[in-house]
Image: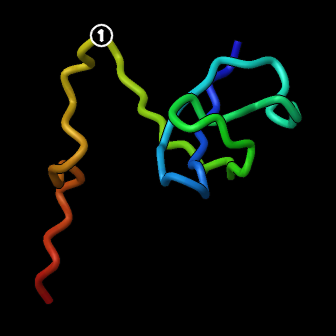
Amino acid sequence: MPIYEYTCNSCNEIFAILQWNPNEKDTACPRCGSQNIKKLLSQFSCSSSADSGSSSGGSSSGFSGGG
């Protein structure tokens, strides 16, 4: 079940809810009970448990930018 983040326009509370449908009309702020809420664009992160041994920040192509 996806997690949706909202902000309450009444009390400025930011909260997350597990729900099947993000357009549910009965979604309310858990702090003040207001239904005057706005769905936020959520951030996400990716992680890997396997270390591939390569670094993503280095210059390993052998190119030297001199000219």
Q: Which residue is mark 1?
A: 50
How would you rate the neighbour count of disc 1 (Cα within 10 Å): few for under 14, some for 14-19, many for 20 or more?
Answer: few
Q: Residue at x 14, y 70 (%)?
A: 64
In the rendered image, residue 19, in percent from the top left (x then y), is placed at 73, 19
Q: Residue at x 88, y 35 (%)?
A: 25
Residue 59 is left or right of residue 36, and the answer is left
Can you tell which quarter of the image residue 45 is in? top left
In the rendered image, residue 2, in percent from the top left (x then y), is placed at 68, 20
Which element is circle 1 on?
loop
Viewer-closest of 22 and 25: 25
Residue type pointed to by label 1: Ala
Viewer-closest of 35 and 43: 35
In the rendered image, residue 35, in percent from the top left (x then y), is placed at 74, 43
Q: Residue at x 68, y 47 (%)?
A: 39
Give the farthest residue toward the front: 32
Residue 60 is left or right of residue 39, and the answer is left
Can you tell which quarter of the image residue 56 is in? top left
- Quadrant (top left, top right, bottom left, bottom right) of the N terminus: top right
